[in-house]
Image: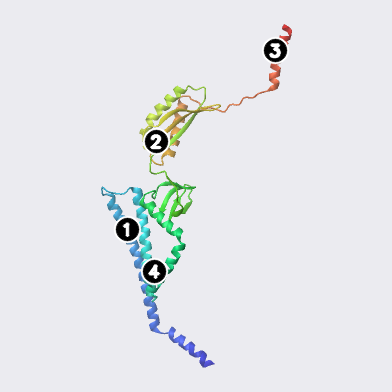
Amino acid sequence: MEKQISGPLDTLYNKITNEDLWISIGAIAIKIIAILLIAGLIIKIGKVAIRNIFKVRAKSPLRFTERRETTLLKLLENVLVYVVYFIAVIMVLSALTINVTGLLAGAGIVGLAIGFGAQNLVRDIITGFFIIFEDQFSVGDYVRIGATEGTVEEIGLRTTKIKSWTGELHIIPNGNISEVTNFSLNNSVAVVDINLSYEENIEEVEKIINDLLLKMPHKYEELVQPPELLGVQNMAASQVTVRVVAETLPMKHWYIARQLRKEIKSVLDERGVDIPFPRMVLYSRQEEEKAKLPNMRQSAEGE
């Protein structure tokens, strides 16, 4: 029994202490480390080259829009990373003496079988391709997709990342994008309503506001043209509402609306125009009955 046990132990000991084994393991480890280092270096050099290509293209007369260039830049960088890492994995497997050819052939058959069930993945990739090809939206655009609204952080072939103004990052599969509202393509419109009391002279107030609006484009470069006073928008129980609209650069309407309210409030205060206050009428039945008594007495005495 001792000889039978010592035999396998001796064989294992001989394998562990075999110099050729450790030399081969060391050579494989060096190959793997070299492959990973070269892959990382290629990715860094490739990203720099892609960015330089886009910088050179920016100086040419024929160029994409800045939005689309940013989108294509991120997409090409992602494709570079995927391709280099895929090749690096194949080379690592070859260094480990794994039959890569048979593995790829088996993976192709398995991939074909999985492809029939991965319809959502295929739909995501196809939709992502058409989003980029048709330039529906780009990185940096402010969009609304379904119930999600925010700035586009990244567009990939499978998913789109949108960051809301409160900081949440939404990752949406491209196949689920059926309707997109892009706020960054065209000029925006700021809408401001000003409430006035019924005692104010509407024509005089409109003249004050119009004089102010003509000076606004010289002060705010976000305005495309001078704001316009449309006139009386609504008449409520205790106030009259006039509306001002202003065409602005894309996504600048919120800022201009706030500045318009500030400027209009300041000029109305200088001219002594007060804002309306809610009014409440109190009705007392006892006072009404007391008021009726003298009238009834006078009518009785007359009779």
Where 180 falls versus 238 (above or below)? below
Q: Secondary structure at mark 3?
A: helix
* Three-letter code for the amino acid on which mark 4 is drawn: Val
1 and 2 marks in contact (CB < 8 Å) = no
In front of the other: 249 or 145: 145
* Three-letter code for the amino acid on which mark 1 is drawn: Val
Q: Where does label 2 land, which residue?
A: 247
Local crowd size for mark 1, using a 10 Å CA cut-off: few (<14), some (14–19), many (≥20): few
Q: Earlier in the sequence, mark 4 or mark 3?
A: 4
Circle 1 or circle 3, nearest the eye: 3
Residue 156 visible (yes or no) = no
Q: Secondary structure at mark 4?
A: helix
Residue pictured at 36% horizontal, 60% vertical: 79
Q: Where does label 4 land, which residue?
A: 89
Location of the N terminus (image quadrant): bottom right
Location of the C terminus (image quadrant): top right
Q: Earlier in the sequence, mark 1 or mark 2?
A: 1
* Three-letter code for the amino acid on which mark 3 is drawn: Asn
Q: Where does label 1 land, which residue?
A: 48
Q: Which mark is residue 295?
A: 3
Where 294 falls versus 136 (above or below)? above
Q: Residue furthest top?
A: 302
In front of the other: 48 or 79: 79
The x, y position of residue 293, in whole percent, is 72, 15
Q: Secondary structure at mark 1?
A: helix
Q: Secondary structure at mark 2?
A: strand
Q: Earlier in the sequence, mark 3 or mark 2?
A: 2
